[in-house]
Image (cartoon, rainbow, N blue to C red):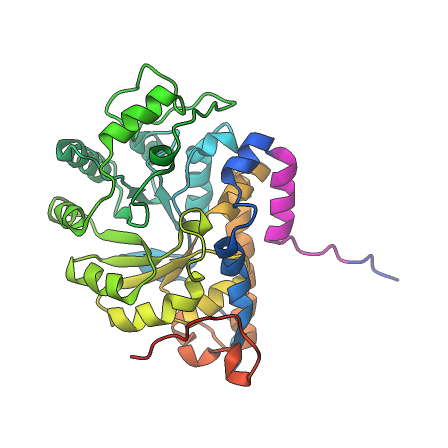
Amino acid sequence: MDRPPRAPLPTLVDIEKSAREKLSEFAWGYYSHPEDGQTYRDNIEAFKRYRLIPRNLRDVSIRDTSVTVLGTRMDIPVAIAPTAVHRLAHPDAELATAKGAAAMNTGMVLGSWANHSLEEVAEATPPGIRWFYMLFYKDRGRMKRLLSRAERAGYTAIFLTVDQPLLPFQIDLRPVTFPVPIRLPNVLDEEPPHAPGSAEHQESMRAALKQPATWDDVQWIRDNTCLPVVLKGILSVEDAKMAVACGANGICVSNHGGRELDGVPATIDVLPDIVRAVGGKAEVYLDGGVRTGTDVLKALALGARCVFIGRPALWGLAHNGAEGVQQVLQILRDELSVAMARAGCAKISDIQPSLVVHQSYYGIPTRRAVPMSKY
């Protein structure tokens, strides 16, 4: 008897397509990449410039994709990066995103621009692995209160974005009208009388936030919390070394998904240099351009402890709420497991730098303008 053809396994491309059909034009534009974003495109294309050299005849009948990040065991080396205003993708917003991450026993960084409070997200996912992304404020009393809230609510790390010397509304004060009701309970101590996105709200935020932040601000946060501190947005060896000297527990190699300074390197291209410069004194992570389990494998081989996804998690949220977020993570977990088997790796510690070479090793032309430095 002829068997019916097997349906193809879903990929993130399928989830993105579904999200595009469900998101409003406003939401798609808000989450999407710049039309001509060189850095956004290069984040994705850069992974294709690395080639895998698999090892064969190894027992990979059972694969273990678990990893320890900041002292917490996660079932997969893929976590969710901080992104803003999940309410545009789904009515349950960050509550659904956190539930999807918790279902896969992996971490989520709750953004300051979240539509639910630190406490609400913690109550929705009691067993979840939660980290908090905090803004820099002129009023350090406000920062101290936010740090205390995060600690009391069970968040286990503080993430700081360091690649935003100027936030967009400090450059352009044109108001934004959101098509759905928006709350920002983790930004200001009290709900403002004016709507988020309005010119008045942007002006109040410009008055409250400390931009640009400096290493002194990072040191103050390091000295005023018992939680590990992760710096997100580092691309240079010099900044990585300064982060270690400042007591950072983790470094996320990130270029903000191409939303900040366009024309910077793809994160996978600078990852090896930063890993060598850090020398094991802090954990190193990566975000930007991760779309397949093979991408995850390459990032781990080049030294990342885990990777973070931003837009793919939002696509999953728009696709099917908490279950959609879980599906995105499950796809990446399944693809990583298969890639590990085919590369001869039964567990994460089997993934070594020798597994990956840059295409230039074979004389294949590359667009890289500056070679990686040597340490």
Residue 22 appears in which quarter of the rendering? top right
Main secondary structure type of the part rendered in magenta: helix
The residue positioned farthest toward the right in the image shown: 1
- The percent position of residue 347, horizontal first and vertical second, equals 43, 71
Residue 28 shown in magenta: no
Q: Residue at x 41, y 77 (%)?
A: 352
Instruction: Out of 287 and 4, give the one closest to the viewer.
Output: 287
Residue 61 at least partly seen: no
Q: Which residue is drawn at 45% across and 62% down?
A: 266
Q: In this view, does 137 lie above or below 261?
A: above
Instruction: Out of 127 and 278, give the one closest to the viewer.
Output: 278
The residue positioned farthest toward the left in the image shown: 223
Q: Which residue is drawn at 19% across and 38% down?
A: 147
- The percent position of residue 133, horizontal first and vertical second, equals 30, 42
Residue 276 at least partly seen: yes
198 displayed left or right of 284: right
300 displayed left or right of 222: right
72 displayed left or right of 6: left
- The percent position of residue 356, horizontal first and vertical second, equals 47, 77
Q: In which quarter of the image is the N terminus?
A: bottom right
Residue 17 shown in magenta: yes
- The percent position of residue 318, horizontal first and vertical second, equals 56, 37
Q: Is residue 85 above or below residue 264?
A: above
How many numbered marks appear? 0
Q: In this view, does 267 lie above or below 90?
A: below
Residue 123 appears in which quarter of the rendering? top left
Instruction: Out of 310 and 128, give the one closest to the viewer.
Output: 310
Q: What stretch is highlighted in magenta?
A: 6-22
Q: In which quarter of the image is the C terminus?
A: bottom left
